[in-house]
Image: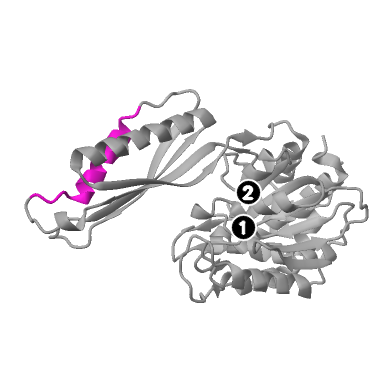
C-alpha cells in the first residue's frame, strides 16, 4: 500500500516535464466561456481534447455532461470518478484571453474552476507518461450546472443514470493546494428581492425605499438566535439596489446562505427567514420575494476512513499542510449516495472570482501528483472498506 507514496517523487518529475501540455489545455478550455446553463461549447472542447488523447470513450450525455472513460483491466471492479465542475461564476459570454508567464496563468475563471478542468483533460496523457494502468474504469467528468441555481444538477443526474457500481470519487478544485474536504455542511442558499410597485413610484415623499426595506430584513435576520451547537451560521454575501444617488431605490436584493451541521437547523432558520420576509412585506406594503437557489444535506466521510488517511499521507509526503473544511462541491452528492469521496485542491492562486484571477504553475505540479497517487491507493482498495 506504500507504493503510491514512494512513487510521488517520480510523479512530480514526470508531470513537470509535460507541464506545457497541461498549460495548453487549461488555456484552451478556460478561454471558452461557461456560465452556468451555458456550458455546451466548453463541454464539446473538453470531449474533443479527451478524444485526441485516445481516451477509450468520450461522450456528452443526455444532460450535457462531458464524460471520458479510461477502461480498466478488471470489469468486475466498480468505476472511480474524477470530477471537476465545468461552469464558472463569470457570466461573460464572449471568449476570454488568458495570459501565461513562466510562473502564473491569469484570466477570468482560471481559479474556479478552469484550471481543474484543463488538468482533467490532461489526465489520459499524464497517466500514459507515468505508465499507469488501473483495474477500475476511470471516469473523467466535468459536470454542468454545478454552481448557484444549477444546484449540482449535472452530477446528480449523472449518478442517477450511471449503470454500474462506483467505488469512489476524487473531486478537483483549482485552488488551494492542501485543500482536503471529506464532509459537507447542511446548506440553503437564497435570495430576497424587494421591489416597489409602479403605482407607488409616482409619489416622491412617501414612496418606500427598497434599500431601507431590505435593511429591515437584514436587521431581522441578524437578530435571529443561533445555537453554539450544532455549529450554525448565516452569511449575507451579496447586496445590491438602486440606480441613482438622488433617487429612491425601487429595487434591492440580498443573497444569503444558511450553514449548519444539522439539516433540521437549516430548515428551521429558513422558515424563520420566510416569516421575517412575510411580516415585513405586510408592514411596508411592498413586494418582497424569497427564493431558494440551492441546498445540500450534511454528510461526511469519517476522518479515519482509509481514503482520507491516504489523501493526508500524500499531502504530508509532498510537504503540503492539509486544510480540512466543509465543501459545497460534488463531494456532497457522492457522499450522500454512499460513495467514498474527497475534494482536493491543485495549486495556489489569488482573486478567485474576480477579473484578475490567477494561479501559480509550479505548485500545480505537486497538486496534480496527488491524483495518480490517490488513484493507485483507491484502485488497491482504499475506498472499499
**Residue 270: percent from left, percent from top:** 42, 35
Is residue 26 something that shows in the picture? Answer: no
| Majority SS type along the magenta span | helix
Residue that label 2 marks: 330
Q: Residue at x 70, y 59 (%)?
A: 141
- Which structural element holds mark 2? loop
The answer to whether residue 25 is left or right of residue 353 is right
**Residue 44: percent from left, percent from top:** 66, 72
The front one of 364 and 272 is: 272
Q: Residue at x 22, y 49 (%)?
A: 211
Residue bounds of the magenta highlight: 206-224
**Residue 261: percent from left, percent from top:** 54, 30
10 Å neighbourhood of mark 2: few (<14), some, or many (≥20)? many
Does the magenta run of residues contain 213? yes
- Which structural element holds mark 1? loop
10 Å neighbourhood of mark 1: few (<14), some, or many (≥20)? many
Identity of the residue furthest to the left in this view: 205
- Disc assigned to residue 85: 1
The answer to whether residue 78 is left or right of residue 41 is right
Whichever of labels 2 and 1 marks the residue nearer the N terminus, that label is: 1
- Which image quarter is the N terminus in? top right
Q: Residue at x 76, y 45 (%)?
A: 168
The front one of 240 and 277 is: 277
Does the magenta run of residues contain 326? no
Asked if disc 2 and disc 1 are in contact, CB closer than 8 Å, the reply is yes
Measured along the vertical axis of the image, is residue 297 above or below residue 176?
Answer: above
The answer to whether residue 120 is left or right of residue 214 is right
**Residue 155: percent from left, percent from top:** 65, 53
Amino acid at each position: 500500500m506504500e507504493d503510491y507514496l514512494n512513487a510521488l517523487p517520480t510523479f512530480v518529475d514526470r508531470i513537470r516535464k509535460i507541464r506545457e501540455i497541461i498549460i495548453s489545455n487549461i488555456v484552451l478550455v478556460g478561454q471558452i466561456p461557461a456560465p452556468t446553463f451555458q456550458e455546451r461549447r466548453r463541454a464539446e472542447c473538453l470531449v474533443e481534447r479527451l478524444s485526441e488523447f485516445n481516451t477509450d470513450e468520450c461522450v456528452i450525455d443526455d444532460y450535457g455532461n462531458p464524460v471520458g472513460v479510461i477502461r480498466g483491466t478488471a470489469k468486475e471492479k466498480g468505476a472511480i470518478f474524477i470530477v471537476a465542475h465545468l461552469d464558472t461564476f463569470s457570466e461573460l459570454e464572449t471568449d476570454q484571453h488568458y495570459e501565461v508567464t513562466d510562473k502564473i496563468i491569469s484570466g477570468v475563471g482560471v481559479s474556479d474552476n478552469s484550471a481543474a478542468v484543463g488538468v482533467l483533460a490532461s489526465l489520459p496523457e499524464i497517466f500514459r507518461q507515468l505508465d499507469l494502468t488501473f483495474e477500475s474504469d476511470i471516469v473523467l467528468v466535468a459536470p454542468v450546472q454545478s454552481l448557484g441555481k444549477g444546484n449540482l444538477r449535472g452530477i446528480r443526474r449523472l449518478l442517477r443514470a450511471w449503470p454500474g457500481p462506483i467505488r469512489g470519487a476524487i473531486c478537483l478544485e483549482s485552488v488551494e493546494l492542501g485543500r482536503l474536504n471529506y464532509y459537507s455542511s447542511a446548506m440553503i442558499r437564497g435570495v430576497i428581492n424587494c421591489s416597489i410597485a409602479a403605482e407607488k413610484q409616482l409619489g416622491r415623499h412617501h414612496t418606500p425605499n427598497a434599500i431601507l426595506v431590505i435593511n429591515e430584513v437584514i436587521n431581522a435576520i441578524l437578530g435571529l438566535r443561533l445555537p453554539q451547537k450544532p455549529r450554525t451560521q448565516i452569511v449575507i454575501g451579496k447586496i445590491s439596489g438602486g440606480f441613482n444617488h438622488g433617487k429612491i431605490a425601487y429595487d434591492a436584493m440580498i443573497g444569503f446562505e444558511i450553514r449548519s451541521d444539522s439539516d433540521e437547523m437549516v430548515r428551521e432558520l429558513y422558515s424563520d427567514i420566510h416569516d421575517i420576509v412575510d411580516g415585513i412585506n405586510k408592514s411596508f406594503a411592498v413586494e418582497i420575494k424569497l427564493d431558494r437557489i440551492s441546498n445540500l444535506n450534511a454528510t461526511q466521510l469519517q476522518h479515519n476512513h482509509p481514503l482520507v488517511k491516504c489523501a493526508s499521507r500524500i499531502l504530508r509526503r509532498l510537504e503540503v499542510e492539509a486544510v480540512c473544511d466543509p465543501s459545497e462541491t460534488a463531494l456532497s452528492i457522492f457522499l450522500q449516495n454512499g460513495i467514498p469521496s474527497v475534494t482536493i485542491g491543485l495549486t495556489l492562486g489569488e482573486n478567485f472570482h474576480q477579473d484578475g484571477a490567477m494561479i501559480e504553475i509550479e505548485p500545480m505540479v505537486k497538486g496534480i501528483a496527488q491524483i495518480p497517487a490517490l488513484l493507485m491507493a483507491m484502485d488497491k482498495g482504499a475506498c472499499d472498506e
